[in-house]
Amino acid sequence: MAQDIRALNETVRTESLFTEELLGELGKVIVGQRYLMERLLVGLFADGHLLLEGVPGLAKTLAVHTLSSSIEAKFQRVQFTPDLLPADLVGTLVFNPRTGDFSPRKGPIFTNLLLADEINRAPAKVQSALLEAMQERQVTIGDTTYPLEDPFLVLATQNPIEQEGTYPLPEAQLDRFLLKLRVTYPNREEEKEILERMSGAVIPKVRAIVTPRKIQDVRKLVKDIYMDEKLKGYILDLVLATREPAKAGLKDLAPLIAFGASPRATLALAASSKALAFISRRGYVTPEDVKNIALDVLRHRVILTYEAEAENLTTEDVVKRILDSVEVP
């Protein structure tokens, strides 16, 4: 077993060399935001959709555009608005008067990377149109189901401060996002670099260095990354603590949590930890990998009670308490 892990570790060290080059390309445009760029790669390598939340002007859309430019893949952007229809996203059947038949007209969802900009500005019927695509990687138009291209990744953005004219995402859709990322302000030095870089005559551009086939190969390798049984138990302890906090020694959290994370969270935490290990050029997962990514996996999967809201507690507060309390192997 130890020899197999060493061999896997060497394979990962070799195959993950390109990640630093990829992060370097992203860094040509995105200043700072190392956390955001690494999490974008986690979603890409773990085959999971990402939800980016932050105030306007923090380069959420720019980061997605930059990622798409570094990959030789199709990219589509959809601006979600209150008048958007499901057919505008997935497509519809168009009547041909010459033949008397209906033919499909595919929508922008038929791509590799889909930027759902300001996703919470579209009504529930449009958001629901994404459910089948995000989970089954397919779209149904009329009576026919069409598979989506591989890779297929939804990168959605939303603004947390402007709530007028928005529609909260349903829990079923939130659960389909592998990670929910909180994008924060840059520090003074980073903002000065943004000022100098983006106010110049030439705006930096990135080159495409990754192919869809490479992404598919990386995803297969990420699934093979070694995870010890103790770490699997740690992941289960974290997720179960969101459902039954009293059993985890967190009795005070019991009246604050209405619903805990689903089994999809368990799978997401394992997959994300492996992807993070790959980016760190390791063929095995460490407890730090799990703990570092757990907040991004769980923050949108825990539903709080009215009592928690009355105490001005957020899901992040609750998840951090769990992470601080559950014993790390």
Image (spheres, grey):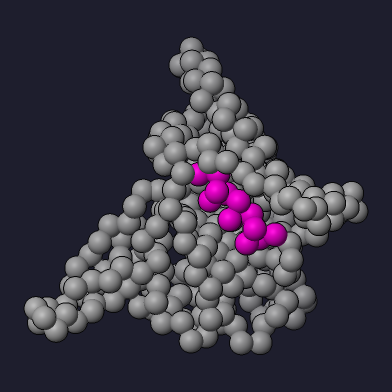
Q: Can residue 11 be seen in this view?
A: yes
In the picture provided, is 260 more to the left or to the right than 288?
A: left
The answer to if 69 sits in the magenta stretch is: yes
Image quadrant in which you'd find residue 41? top right
Against 250, is 22 above or below? Answer: above
Position in image of residue 318 (x %, y %):
70, 62
Q: Is 89 a magenta residue?
A: no
At a point 74% along the width and 66% down the height, the residue shown is 57
Q: In this view, does 48 lie to the left or right of 107?
A: right
Q: In this view, does 195 lie to the left or right of 109?
A: right
Q: Which residue lies furthest to the top in this view?
A: 3
Which region of the structure is painted magenta?
Answer: 59-71
Q: Where is residue 211 in the image (x, y as percent from the top left)?
A: 44, 39
On the rendered structure, is 268 left or right of 94? right
Residue beneath the point at 40% across and 57% down = 111
| Quadrant, the C terminus | top right
* Image: 153 above or below 220: below
Q: Residue at point 56% right, 80% down?
A: 121
Residue 203, image x, y percentages:
71, 51
- Could you say which is closer to the camera, residue 215 or residue 313? 215
Q: Which residue is drawn at 9% across and 78% down?
A: 99
Horizontal and vertical percent position of residue 304: 63, 72
